[in-house]
Image (cartoon, helix red, strand yellow):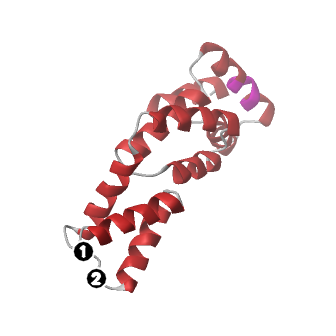
Amino acid sequence: MSAYIDGLKLLGRRELSVSDLRSRLLDREHTPERADDAIARLLETGALDDRRVARAYARTASKVKGRGRLRVTRELQAMGIARDVIAEAVGDVFGEIDERAMIDRAVQKKLRGRKPSTMQERARLYQFLMRQGFTPAAVTAALRRTRRDD
């Protein structure tokens, strides 16, 4: 089977970045030259587009999974997407989102309505929010809000 057809089938299942598609084509034992030719053809037809992949991933990660800007950026970098494409996609998606409300939802989900009473619980909450990809300043502000609500 040709690398182009394999690429179309893979893209039919889910959106992939150029880097992901290339590695999957190579895993299916296509030569690097044929994989590159197939990728060039898929890019020409618009079936393969890192900008579209980055925006869709950033939108899903932020709105459905509640992840912050920093984590989404790291995950897109791990997918092999170019920095300028990542910056554009993350800027578009997070420009529309109230990050403070996102953090507050994450805090409520994590705490299930109770307040962190010890320093250890606050430290765990801080680490959780940092792993979710929120900035240290935003996390600190959220922890202050939870303390003020006490």
Residue at x 67%, y 39% (from the top left corner)? 19
The location of residue 50, given as percent across then percent down, is 61, 30
User: Quick check: 26 left or right of 8?
Assistant: right
Relative height, residue 141 to residue 77 (above, below):
below
Q: State the residue in front, 102 or 36.
A: 102
Counting other residues with Cα less than 10 Å from the Cα at mark 2, is it few (<14), some (14-19), or many (20 or more)?
Answer: few
Q: Quadrant of residue 80?
A: top right
Q: Which mark is residue 123?
A: none
Q: Is residue 51 left or right of residue 143?
A: right
Residues in magenta? Answer: 35-39
The image shows residue 99 at horizontal and vertical percentages of 41, 47
The answer to whether one can see residue 8 in this image is: yes
Which corner quadrant holds the N terminus?
Answer: top right
Give residue 82's position: percent from left, percent from top. 69, 37
Asked whether the beta carbons under mark 2 and mark 1 sit within 8 Å of each other, the answer is yes
| Cα–Cα gap, marks 2 and 1 | 6 Å
Residue 103: in magenta span: no
Query: Which mark is on residue 117?
Result: 2
Q: Quadrant of the C terminus?
A: bottom left
The structure residue drawn at horizontal position 66% and vertical position 28%, both measured from the top left corner, is 3
